[in-house]
Image (cartoon, rainbow, N blue to C red):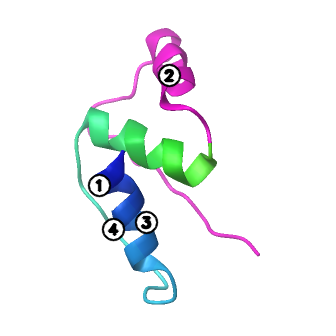
Amino acid sequence: MRRATAFVEGLEGRATAVVAMTHHAAILALRSVLERRPVTELVEEVRVCKTPNAGVLVCERRG
């Protein structure tokens, strides 16, 4: 979680677009930071709807 938070904070004001390739656990951590949701909630969610292999997750910053 610390690394995901540091990654997202490091992007502030620097990048207009970012592409990151990573594994399942890091995706959950990044989603937790970006969506401001507890990672435990996301873990429960992906137990029902698995994160696909070679999937693409798109996040947009608003505001």
* Residue on which the image places disc 4: 19
Asked if labels 1 and 3 touch by Cβ distance under 8 angstroms, the answer is no
For the C terminus, which image quadrant? bottom right
In percent of the image, x 56 and y 32: which residue is there? 38
Front residue of this view, candidates 10 and 47:
10
Asked if the residue under mark 4 is in contact with the one under mark 2, i.e. CB atoms within 8 Å, the reply is no
For the residue marked with disc 3, what is the amino acid?
Val
Location of mark 2 (residue): 40
The answer to whether marks 1 and 4 mark residues whose Cβ atoms lie closer than 8 Å is no
Residue located beneath label 3 in the image: 8
**Marking on residue 3:** 1
Kindly identify the residue that appears in the image at 49 percent across and 31 percent down.
39
Q: Position of residue 61 (x, y in %)?
A: 63, 69
Which mark is nearer the camera, 2 or 4? Answer: 2
Question: What crowding class fits label 1: few (fewer than 14 Cα within 10 Å), some (14-19), or many (20 or more)?
Answer: few
Q: Earlier in the sequence, mark 2 or mark 4?
A: 4
Measure how far apart labels 1 and 2 are at the Cα level: 17 Å
At label 2, the amino acid type is Thr
Tell me the kind of residue under disc 1.
Arg
Q: Whole-Å distance between the Cαs marked 1 and 4?
A: 16 Å
**The residue tagged with tag 4: helix, strand or loop?**
loop
Residue positioned most to the front:
2
